[in-house]
Image: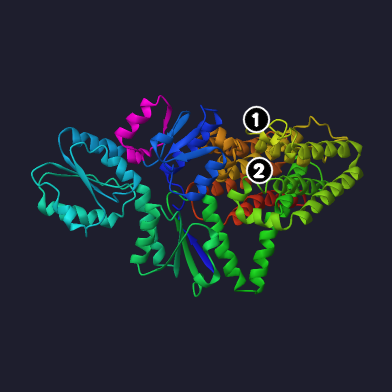
Amino acid sequence: MKIRLAKTAGFCMGVRRAVDLVLDIQRDSPPLPIVTYGPLIHNPQTLQLLESRGIKQVDFLEQIQGGTVFIRAHGISPLERHLLEQKALRIIDATCPRVARVQAIIRKHARVGDFCVIVGDKDHPEVRGLMGFASAGGLAVPTPEYSSQIEMIPEDRGICLVAQTTQEVQTFQVVVEILRKRLTRLHVYNTICDSTRKRQLEVRQLAKNVDMIVIVGGKGSGNTRRLVKVAQAQRMDTLHVETDEEIVPSLLFGAETVGVTAGASTPNWQILSVIEKIKQIGMSRKSGPLTILRRVADTVVMTYLWAALGGGGLTAACIVLQGQQITLLPLLVTMLFVFSMHLLNRIQDISGAVRFNTPQIAAFYARHRRLLSALVALSSIGSMFLSAWMGIYTCLLLLFMLVTGGLYTAPLISASRFPSAKLRSLKDLPGSKTPLVAAGWAMSAAVLPVIGTESSLLLPGLIVGFVFTAGMVFWRTALSDLMDIQGDRIVGRETIPILLGAQNTSRLLLGLLLFLTILPAASAALGWVARAGFLLIINTSIFAVIFLIYKRRHPFDRLSFEAMLDSNFILAGVLSFLYGNW
């Protein structure tokens, strides 16, 4: 079964801004309690997660007694805002900027006495808030069929016509044509946001290439329901679900290609869970060699076996850069170290961000936790045993790295004795994961093969190899964190993209990639490292292409994407091996 994911599926700008704002403010310890006036967004699962973090929802002004109040993404009326301010609260406005623009348009026309017409659902919180700005009078028109309401529009006054930001484009256009025929002083503002237009257009395009469309999002989300309506208008089998639990094989009967999209308030982890459920249903229908191969490949990537091979590839590259001959033992030590540390970290995180970022992986680790834990122990012991053959210094350094890696994820402060402590383990240090992972890979790839040998640790080749490996692994990990920013925010993990912001992190990755392109090539030209340094430009160029794919938001399978990243490290080893044996 083929799955086609719409490019714009998931949080829109306004929803992402609201959720990020709430979580960022909470991190800064504002006055308690922290509440949202009405649902912050229309997604029950996200609201439940926010409540689990102490951010509760209140529906009436009388329920607010103090603390910090967030205005929902849909906005509120001026009267409600005034009543909140009278309570002397700390008010944080999470209104979507697109909604705020509509509020400003209505306010401007109301000042000169214009009547306001909103094409939208009168019971939707956004429309209720907008009507509060229509001080000169107004009404909401849900669809062109509401002719009795259209007849109530005064013909002797200026009319301000706007749309609910998530309204269906065709509905708004039809209402505009009807009113233009009977009103002379009509001021039309198409305030449907770009995200809504793109999503509806993508549904129409998907309908041409799929057998069924699955739309993920809250049942109370207006923009999600409109996506369903658009899909059904294309005479397409349409399934509207909130979670993957609603999908059963019988619902997908006969569908060979399934299109997936989601409402503007649907988080990535819900979309990923639905895609994984559809993929599993599709794979269960087939039992051929290609299906078996795909399952094996997914397991290899999920368990970091492919990443371990990547560690071996970078080790080979470092050895060749230092002008030495590749031998199998250092490669095996690095591979076992990378495998054990990443596997351990993932096992201890299955109840954390991984269940949101990659639900497929979380489910796999929950099912096979005992076996995977045994593999951690065996690979750690195996790496120690092999490192002892390389020398006492290698063995001691590896022991230090294994202990440090184990302590990084281990709880050091008791939650029962210190319930208010935010830093319970080393992994809770803001932004610590990415540089420490990079340093661990670089130590194993560049330092372990030469420590205790006649080669000096101050050799330029070692330094260049260490910096290049650390930089490449930092780049790979930071890009993964950038993709996982939603889930990390929800659980309170402060990764580099969360600390710096997505845009600044992207700039950092571009700058780092440029540096990593110049470093080995310039070092090879100066004779500091072997001329194999020129070949590593291929690897940085591949990462540049991967980054371009990410920035253009091309739909992708997460495991395939991770395999592509680690394959680049394996390629670095292959290129170095070919150079060393030329």
Q: Nearer the viewer, mark 1 or mark 2?
A: 1
Q: Residue at (35%, 47%) from the top-left corner?
A: 194
- The foreground one among 285 and 40 is 40
- Direction from residue 217 to residue 386 in the image, left or right: right
Residue 124 appears at what percent x and percent y? 33, 48
Q: Which amino acid is tagged 2?
A: Phe
Q: Is residue 99 above or below residue 347?
A: above
Residue 392 appears at what percent x and percent y? 91, 38
Q: Which residues are magenta?
A: 75-100
> Which disc, if any, is residue 534?
2
Q: Secondary structure at mark 2?
A: helix
Q: Quadrant of the N terminus?
A: bottom right
Report the residue marked by disc 1: 420
Q: Residue at (37%, 42%) from the top-left corner?
A: 74
Residue 88 appears at what percent x and percent y? 40, 24
Q: Is residue 349 above or below residue 31?
A: below
Residue at the far front in the pictured view: 62
Q: Secondary structure at mark 1?
A: loop
- Direction from residue 471 to residue 115 in the image, left or right: left
- The foreground one among 368 and 503 is 368
Q: Is residue 234 above or below residue 10?
A: below
